[in-house]
Amino acid sequence: MPALDRLRSIYATRFVSPAVASRYVRACLTCRNRAVMDREELRAVKQMHRVTNGLSTDIFNAMSVQDRHSETSVLDRLAQVAGVDAARTTKAAVDSIRERGFFVFPNRMAADVVDELRGFSLREPAIVEPPRPDGPRIEIFRPEQPTAEKFAIHGEKINLFTPAREIALSSIMRATAEIYLRRAPILSTLQMWWSAKYSPVPCSEVAQYYHYDFSHPKWLKYFIYLTEVTPNTGPHCLVPTTHKRDRAGRPYRTPLRSRITDEEIEAAYPGCQIELYGPAGTILAVDTRCWHKGKVPTSDHRLILEIYFTSHAVGESLPPEHLAIFGDADGASIGLGRDVTELRWAHP
Ligand SMILES: O=C(O)CCC(=O)C(=O)O
């Protein structure tokens, strides 16, 4: 690498400009009482994250905490609207996510809800990924003849599709997110996608290499398997506890690295990678600040639904999925007179 480029890369890894630092400080001081932050603020939080190995993000999040979303107050409200068992499950979920970065719910989505969602995915046009040089492609996924690695469905149709809405409105999911974020959660994404059995080679554009997400300061993703997931059908993989700061991952949390190989992860965290399997209906909650990826499916396709709650919205306003499902209230907080539709759990 030429000397000037090396100097630039060292600078980008270790330092931020005074303008970025001051934008970050201003964001820390003002974001507690705002649901929406602008893109420049997020960029500053992200740049600081990389040079401080995550410490600055933890400080930002500590300064954004809202007392009314404390664990005790949310669990009390949840027990009133959904019962003590729901509160117990939520507490177990939050403890596990805090400690290990993920939780697999003991109950699953009911089979008829899974079927409805799967049916929807087979009749709605999807965005084909990775994009081709000749531009974006929209296609209905055909399991017998996939033409790419990923087929993603999001937007108005899914926001209005009752089974998907009902899951997003589940009080257990919102309560878990609310306690974990310590704020009223913002629904930032509601989508489903097929990871097709298409190529045996991992594809970086569809998240088949290890990476960590960072499109908001704090977030929680729910992944619901809508097909059976085995070692060969594209399990979600992660390295538990790496949503917290650690030394082993520091070299990879730099601006120059975004896709990390299995071998690099193995060298940094020997024996720690896990793969999450389960029947259709399995519900995972993951803080994808962990190193994570989707494993390439080799024997069959995988369908997954994602519900992504974040601490803040980024841009000018609340996201369309949030507005479509929760309206323009400041966040998807439970027990405040809004819909408390419960998941239809199936017992394993
Ligand atoms: O497909 C997967 O399991 C991984 C998804 C992922 O990396 C993400 O949503 O951030």
Image (spheres, rainbow, N blue to C red):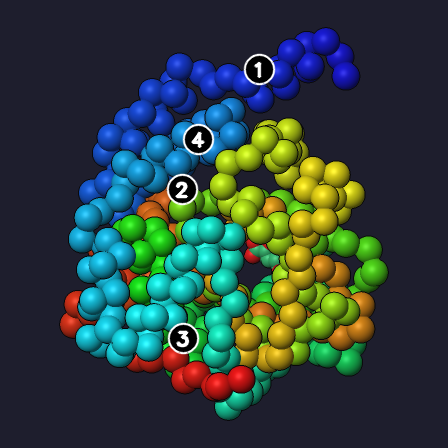
Does 141 appear above or below 348?
above
> What type is the residue that disc 4 sits on?
Leu
Q: In which quadrant of the rendered view does residue 61 lie?
A: top left
Q: Which mark is residue 217?
A: 2
Q: Secondary structure at mark 2?
A: loop
Question: Ligand 1 near label 4 (Cβ, under 8 Å)?
Answer: no
According to the image, label 1 marks what residue?
11
Which circle's residue, 3 or 4, is located before the other in the chain? 4
Name the spot of residue 228 as percent of width and height, x first.
66, 78
Viewer-closest of 155 and 216 = 216
> What type is the residue that disc 1 sits on?
Tyr
In front: label 4 or label 1: 4
In front: label 3 or label 4: 4
Question: Ligand 1 near label 3 (Cβ, under 8 Å)?
Answer: no
Does 156 appear above or below 218?
below
Name the spot of residue 211 as percent of width and height, x first.
62, 45
Which circle's residue, 4 or 1, is located before the other in the chain? 1
Q: Is residue 126 left or right of residue 56?
A: right
Name the spot of residue 195 as percent of width and height, x first.
68, 66
According to the image, label 3 marks what residue?
167
Quadrant showing the N terminus: top right
Q: Write the residue at 69% across / 14% down.
A: 6
> What type is the residue that disc 3 sits on?
Ile
Q: Which mark is residue 52?
A: none
Q: Secondary structure at mark 3?
A: helix
Asked if the residue under mark 2 is in contact with the one under mark 1, i.e. CB atoms within 8 Å, the reply is: no
